[in-house]
Amino acid sequence: MVSKMILFLKLILLGAMVFKQVDANEVNLNINTMKAISDEFLDPNEEKHSNFLSDFKEQCEKGQTSPETILRNMKYRLMDTCNSHILRESAEKLSKEKTIIEELREVTSISAQPCILFGLLVQSKLDITTIEEFSVKVNKELGDLTYVADVCSSVAHNESSRMKEQYTEEIRNKVNKISSYVANYIDESRLLLWPTVHNRVLREMIQKFVELPEKFKDEAFRDAHTTLKTIGDKNYVYGILVVKPETEEYKFFYEGIDNYCSAKYGEDNRTHGFDTVIARLPFNQSLPEEKFTVLKRMHMLKEHVNRFEAIIRLELEQLCQNPSLPQIAATLKNKFGPDFISKEMFHGWAIVRESSFLCPTVEYRSSPYTDGDLDSIISIECLRTGSNSASPDARLIRAATQKLLLNGILFYEGLLARYEEQFHVELNETLTWKTGFPTEEELSEEIIDLPIGMGKYDTSQQKTAIKSMSRHLISLGDLHRYKSLIDGSENYETSKSYYQKSSQLWPSTGHPYNQLGVVVYYSKRVIDEFFYLTRALACAHPYEAARDRLKQRLDAMRTKVSKYQPVLDKECGIVKEQGNALRRLQIIRQIWIHPITESTQDGTGEKVKDDILSHFLEHSKAKLHRRAVSYLSDTFGLLVTKIGMEHFESVSERAFGLLYASLAKTETDFSADQLVKLAAMFIYVVQTNLEKATTSSSTSQLETSVNTVVTYFLVLLEHLETHRTLLFPALNVLATWICHPETEGVWSTVGHVESIGKTILPKLTGLIKDYGSEEGPKGVYPETVLLASFFKVFEPSPVETGRSRMDNLKDAMEKIKSLKKTSQKKEEGEEEKTPEEEDNEEPKSRERIIEEERDKEKATIVIHPEYLIPDTNVFIGELELIRQLLEVASKVDKLQILVPTIVLDELQNISKLSASDPKSNSESHDPDRISKAKQAVGWLKEQAKGGGKKTNSLFTLTTQGKRLHSLIMAAEDLDGIGKMTNDDMILQSAVKWSESLPAPASSSILSQIGTPIRNATLRNCVLITGDRGLTIKAIGASLPCRGIANFAKWMT
């Protein structure tokens, strides 16, 4: 706390030194004086002398203390004398000042300048903290002056409301002009000063620390790094790379004059020196994963430095004698390839040279924050740290901060109310969704009447007021977010709601979307986070700060998925091994005899697929959703950053395989909201890659992006019949984009499309289906409002088209069909038998079966089901089918259901788990799974009542294959059983029971059909399971298996 106070005092002294140069303290004194008098005037408890009001009115209207006089002085010092930002010539002059380079650590005098801002930049040595502190000071004074002007207008123009409003508006306009001018001057000047000063710093540091080439050490850059941190942006860390020029191309470099590329030759027809690159790497200290990313990249830069250390040593002597230090990007590109200094490698980079002229190939960016933002960032972070510290003053700081935030919230709430009254606008009536965002039902089924938002008002003044209210809602959201931080709360729903309302009022600006991207980070909703950050960048007025944050968060997602990859690699490897085992076991033929009709069917056993998608389909919906979200987000990230594209095929195939499997469930954890946001994210990738493809001969990245969107569209389309309400909003977003005139540039560039993920996804047949028709709405769909101002595809003010979602979908389907490759069209025309067609094949007669199998060596199992042994997942996933089978068994008295003790035990254990258990991290803690296990246990207990006399077809089966006299909910002593998995114990129960059964009588239907067949195994016990591994083990043990749905369908 003491060190912070010292730093604060130093900043105040430095600010005072700058102001003293132009007698600015007088301005500050006058503002403070008038603010104190204004506070006294508004305080009803303050005793005022008889002449107080007349004196105050005189001070407001005349003399050095009037707001107009103060503003005139500030305008002269901050605008009139600073009539343009620092030009190239001034920057070059500054770079040669000894005070900038050789005496960096000393505060020395510089000749007084009439422009206070010029003096600030020079005296601070471009120190970002000092500059920000100055901006805060100016901003605060202008805010205080606005407050004083409001009070003065009430005193001076008490009798005329029109003059009062006119006076206040005039003062505010002047304040805004000064504030904007100061921010622009500092930003523009820093852009030109930055490369110039950095070049001089590097050159001087090398000469200062390296007397002889052989003494070159890493310490040579230590002071340079320190300086870079102070005169650079605080949100970056800096890495320096020094390389000797070796190619002939080095003779040509930018001299920095009018973009002219000139030739330079030394006495030996070459130039001695170094190419020097400063890499600016974004660094958000509040995100732990950022530290790892930055350290990794800095390490990479260090490796490059070490690689050329020997060359640098040989060159140093000539460098110190060389009067110039030419730099050129083309040389580095020639050495390392075009990717070395690409945007993917360095988020922001600069070629350092003596001249300050901006090379056309170098992109410079200033801080995206306004003075007000910087004020908030600095102050709130300090207050938050102090509130949560171990200091004895922490409680007082927290209380003061909470009071400050509460006052700010009350101020903006009151300000919004004044807007409503002053401009005759109603906030709630202007909002499409009062809570800020549509519910699932509203998004899927609601039609929105026009007009909406600003369209409800006619005057330009009202529309401007709505935009202003949008900004005030952002401020309210910020204040509530800060309040949650100070309070230590994890509930950011209030701030989120304000940001969402702001985005509805003014969808064309990216600011509220960026704030939403920040606040949803705390709730770990990655799709929401990526969506909002892309929305911030894809609207009419993009918010550029979102770009770096998006890349940072995508890097974090890449790290997360890289941890998933080995797990899924292992699972997919097991699936392939099981597939190989299954193919070997498929030589075993199965003949099934119906337990009631005694009709026979050949080869109708459970068909276990050996593909990855089947493995995904076995996952719970929660596990599928969790993995699909991560993989879909990483697919999006790879296309945005283009880093790690060597993994794209594997990641994208699994992403869409997991999505397909999730939507194939009767219930899915995906919401319509998430699917719409994913659609927007993939569209964003195409649009951004289209812009780059127009300036590049390569279109491969664009083609990959387009094929990703098409695959997403086809996967959703495939499940439209089963999840119509859920999928229609996202499909309508994609269809609108596909058919929009703005997208024609995409189709003309790529020429054709194809889906990805063919090694996992099945054949997608959605394009050839007929989905019926639908009447067009009178209004617009919610997703159109949700994506207002998203590129040029979705208008800022949606208009009624009279077209239904189905109309858009059919047009999009036709568009995609026309873009399909010829070979793919041919492939789509090939007919395949559906599972239904295969199941409906004519059964073979008993005589034909016996005839075909006579004299054959092929192994055969003949099954006449009498005993059904279900595994645990059957009770959890298909309890209703078990009930139906038990009902059939009780009626015909030809079937018995034997429940293994390990199944009963496992069900009871799952039912006792808690979904909110902090230790839970697995599929077993899935709330849906726990709920269904409880239902199954409850049903089994009901059946076991009265000693199991409720039914004579349900029994308990021990792991040793012993059938108890009824269904008994008792645990079995498993001591001595060894290290066996639950699946192995279920299989052991079934096998031992099957082996204990007597051979079928010769007169039985099983013997009559099975005996004439050579090598036939006769079975009347069936394992009911859908587990791939357990099925393969059972088939290997000659124990027939079927899934519960397959068996129930066969029975009926």
Image (tube, rainbow, N blue to C red):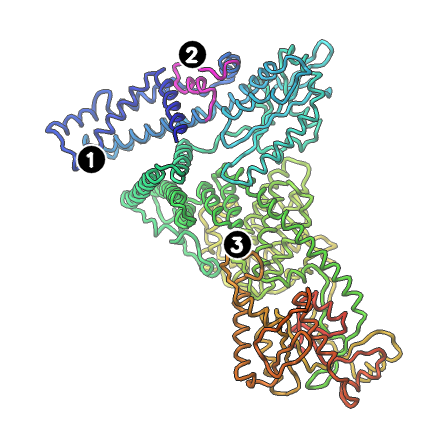
In the structure shown, which secondary structural element does the residue marked by tag 3 occupy? helix
Q: Residue at x 14, y 27 (%)?
A: 54
> At label 1, which amino acid type do we have?
Leu
Q: Which of the two discs, 1 and 3, labels the residue nearer the N terminus? A: 1
- Mark 1 neighbour density, 10 Å: few (under 14) some (14–19) many (20 or more): few
What kind of residue is marked 2? Ser
Q: Position of residue 841 (x, y in %)?
A: 74, 76
> In the structure shown, which secondary structural element does the residue marked by tag 1 occupy?
helix
Residue 710 lies in the magenta stretch? no
Q: Which mark is residue 109?
A: 2
Q: Nearer the viewer, mark 1 or mark 3?
A: 1
Q: Is residue 380 above or below residue 657?
A: above
Q: Report the disc number at residue 42.
A: 1
Q: Nearer the viewer, residue 855 or 515?
A: 855
Measure the C-alpha gap from mark 3 to mark 2.
60 Å
Q: Residue at x 80, y 66 (%)?
A: 584
Q: How far is the residue under mark 1 from the one under mark 3?
A: 51 Å
